[in-house]
Amino acid sequence: IKEDNKQVFETTIEELQPYDLAQLYVNFPVSDRNKYLSYLSLDQLAKLIQALTNKEQLEVLKALSVEKTSQVLERMDNDDLVSLLSSLEPDKIKKLLAGLKQEASDMIQNLMKYPPETAGRIMNNQFVWIYKSYTVREAVDKLKHFAELAEYLNYLYVIDDRKRLVGVVSYRDLLLADLFEKIEDIMKTRVVHVDAWMDQEKVAQLIQRYEFVTMPVVKEDQTLLGVVTVDDIIDVVYQEANEDIEKLSASGKAIDFTTKPLVAASRRLTWLILLLFIGIVSGSIIASFEETLDQVVALAFFMPMIAGMTGNTGTQSLAVVVRGLTTNDLGWKQVIKLIIRELWVGIIIGVACGILIFIIALIWQGSATLGFVIGISLLCTLIIGTLAGTIIPLILYRLNIDPAVASGPLITTINDILSLLIYFGIATLFISKLM
Amino acid sequence: IKEDNKQVFETTIEELQPYDLAQLYVNFPVSDRNKYLSYLSLDQLAKLIQALTNKEQLEVLKALSVEKTSQVLERMDNDDLVSLLSSLEPDKIKKLLAGLKQEASDMIQNLMKYPPETAGRIMNNQFVWIYKSYTVREAVDKLKHFAELAEYLNYLYVIDDRKRLVGVVSYRDLLLADLFEKIEDIMKTRVVHVDAWMDQEKVAQLIQRYEFVTMPVVKEDQTLLGVVTVDDIIDVVYQEANEDIEKLSASGKAIDFTTKPLVAASRRLTWLILLLFIGIVSGSIIASFEETLDQVVALAFFMPMIAGMTGNTGTQSLAVVVRGLTTNDLGWKQVIKLIIRELWVGIIIGVACGILIFIIALIWQGSATLGFVIGISLLCTLIIGTLAGTIIPLILYRLNIDPAVASGPLITTINDILSLLIYFGIATLFISKLM
């Protein structure tokens, strides 16, 4: 396609979406990429950069001249720019910001004040505001003037003379209203909005519940700061789901298909080494029951099954709790209710599996006592495993501690230890009957 | 608030969002709910129903008269109506559809032809289309006329006289164009669209990549059928993330905070009983190595650690693969690349943990041979566990089999068996040196 014919190329790419521009860039051989970049307009470059991964963004920026970089950065959406800058070192940020116009640079620095994963960090200024004293005609004129900001726009946000958010007017309201009506007479005054410090997960919940395309963000004094758009929220939902899965699998932060083996291994090793030491604790529990085990080796046959089942039921409970917390807020009352529910689940599961394993052990090993010991052990460990998988993440949640600490393998390993203690404890009680 | 004063109540709720209407309903005591329903207008009832959970929806429908039900159903968005109907039995559906106007009922039945979780099932008709032969003025007139459909609208989709999708015009293009220009002269002809049979997860990927608010859905012959809106996509993303977590934790389908204990327990038991039998297989492996175990009881101390670590590394790999597949499409070439990456991860993790456990075993049990056996075993099991966690879901994915079969605990349990075979196999080889 790209036979040095700039003219043809430009008409081909004119209608391309940012994602397509980015795919083209990624699929060109490295040697052709700079030529490709030189063919793009400043607006197209800005779009391209927004659709690339962080690593590729830095590559593109390196290839551009200092002057061109500033011009491209100024054309980027400010939320994308903030997330690009967040990945750089402080002095690199300063250098890039220095190239921007004072106004733009100030605004970016203001946004970067908000901590990552808050509404303030992901909001942008792609919206149109109007004063409540405007007439409908003035509002429509302003809308026309800022039409390029209107891509994600279904609403105009209305502010008073102190820039406080006081209402909202939909595009439909404008169409149906008389041109000389006052905005304050047709606006809706009940505006769902969020605080700039709100956690992005909460913002995602609200946008999902209310099915909004944009959500206005305000400061403590109700001053309108920006909007969070639904496209950013989709990214947030993906990101939060990935974090939940990282918690459940202890697979380590941010490993994707392109992560290098050494990096992926070292991220995963942190957890594995911790779990290895906890595994040694299990080992020393078994060692302390060496005498029991020595006398009835058959106890060892059921060890992995009991530990495994306890781990599995704990993981199941954990998954239900972690997912539930992403879409629900729980008070203490609901927490208690949930724990009692899971207690019942544990009892039902424990009784069912306990009876089943009693029958299996009886047939296989021909000993009712052994079957009884194993059945009772499984009943107890399943109840306790279910409760541990429920209570540990709930307590962390209620105490506002990051529940990432309660990862799946950690709960599994805690359940391993508990189940071995219970199993060998019960077996030792019955040791004289077992021999 | 609700002191039998209908007037006051109506002005209070007039500006409420659907989600707020639903919250009010849920929080009223059961005795007041019917009165609340009788105060709502048909439009408000439709909005309320859309924001309720399935169980609550049926409750509301039961409380309404047959005639009112039809009127309310006709006011619902058709995608929400389809998802409500999907949960009912066929003759109940027929009865409800019979109350609707012929036109509405036909349309709903057309939508229900598409299988669940496809674009056709989640699309709706909340969009405005125009013929390419329209002038800008005609388009604007049509837009004004259908303004109530325009809430989610940033684009008008352009069709030819055979109803095929041929272009798209943004609201901004309309604003900036001359009123007498032809639509076909200002429209963009490159329209990203999806087929009605496309999986909803793929649609979500496309909407995320292109940052669209609506995505047009077409039939095989390019006829425009409807649009998928971004608010439905957020629900899809949540739903798909939950499915991934169900897979990883084998926690059973659709258990939330309100599921009854018996229901939750029976959904979870399916998996647990299967895993119990696989656990018995582990047990019989240990039983077949009874002689080895009897001679060196210390081998039992390290058994849970080795099985646990192999399970953990398998779960980590599984999580990386399952999450990666939600945002990436993989060809065979990338599959091979990923497997080789994970092989390296397994080797690095195996060497690191193997050396560590060798040192621990040497100090604890004072035997270099035992340390060596355990270290080598851990090295082998970690490599194999990592590969199993990667390869099993990838093969299922490439063969288009539902990867739900490769749930986390299943992989953990398979890894348990593999690790015990390797561990006792190596230990038996060295048994003369160990004693």
Image (cartoon, coloured by chain):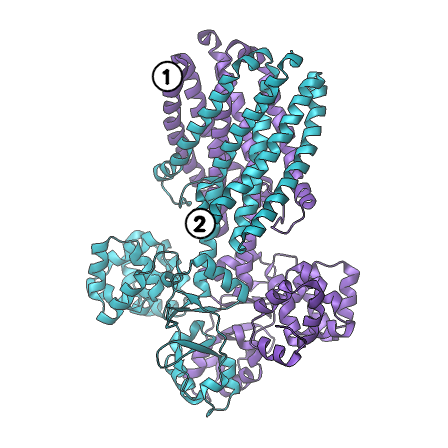
Chain colours: A cyan, B purple
Q: Is residue B244 left or right of residue A38?
A: right
Q: Is residue A376 left or right of residue B318?
A: right
Counting the numbered discs, the total is: 2
Query: Which quarter shows the N terminus of chain B?
Result: bottom right
Residue A115: horizontal and vertical position, in percent?
34, 57
Q: Residue A149 sits in which quadrant?
A: bottom left
- Determine which of the numbered discs, if any, sits on residue A400 in the image: 2
> Disc 2: which chain?
A
- Is B278 rendered above or below residue B325? above
Residue B378: horizontal and vertical position, in percent?
44, 24
Label 2 secondary element = loop
- Is B71 rendered above or below residue B246? below
Q: Are marks 2 and 1 on the same chain?
A: no
Query: Which of the two residues, B85 or A60, is positioned nearer the viewer here?
Result: B85
- Is A308 rendered above or below residue A318? above
> Disc 1: which chain?
B
At label 2, the amino acid type is: Asn
Query: Which of the two residues, A61 or A251, is positioned nearer the viewer here?
Result: A251
Q: Residue B108 sits in which quadrant?
A: bottom right
What is the spatial separation of the Cα atoms under label 2 and label 1, in whole angstroms? 40 Å
For this orientation, the residue located farthest to the front is B3
Q: Residue B5 sits in which quadrant?
A: bottom right
